[in-house]
Amino acid sequence: MQHLDMLDAVAACGARTLVDVGPLPERNVAWYLELAPQVDVQIVLSTGFYLEARTPEPFRSFDEGQCVERFRRELAEGIGDSGVRASLIKAASNKAELTDWERTVLRA
């Protein structure tokens, strides 16, 4: 099933919003811009970071201030140079004990 078909099926069930909580730095915002007018579902993007192991360098070297600046910029100005702003901050961990990097991201 293609992306459009899946989103149309979701909309047919009554869903009106899709929240993408995968804020990887390599997000393809152009794809979302192309997709959005073709479906009857609002697409909401996030900023933040996913699991440390899934976050590429140099992002894993960010200190708290750099994380805050990235979140602020993507919320207020847009993701990259797209002008598309994130609407929420997402952070994740998959272990009971947080890594130092995860603590930094969650504080940010």
Image (cartoon, rainbow, N blue to C red):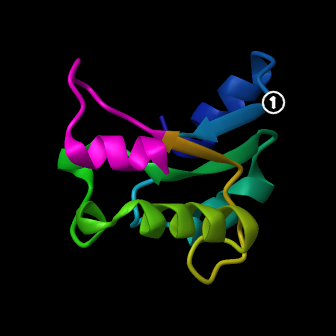
Crowd rating for badge 1 (residues with CA inside 10 Å; few <14, some 14–19, many 20+): some
Residue type at mark 1: give it: Arg
Magenta stretch encompasses residue 11:
no
> Quick check: 63 above or below 87?
below
Residue drawn at x 67%, y 35% as measured from the top left:
18
Q: In the drawing, does residue 70 fall left or right of residue 17?
A: left
Residue, disc 1: 16
Residue 9: x, y in percent? 67, 25
Residue 28: x, y in percent? 49, 66
Q: 44 or 61: which is nearer to us?
A: 61
Residue drawn at x 71%, y 50% as measured from the top left:
87
Q: Secondary structure at mark 1?
A: loop
Q: 6 or 100: which is nearer to us?
A: 100
Residue drawn at x 65%, y 78% as measured from the top left:
82
Range covered by the magenta-colored residues: 91-108
Residue 91: x, y in percent? 44, 40
Residue drawn at x 68%, y 71% as measured from the top left:
78
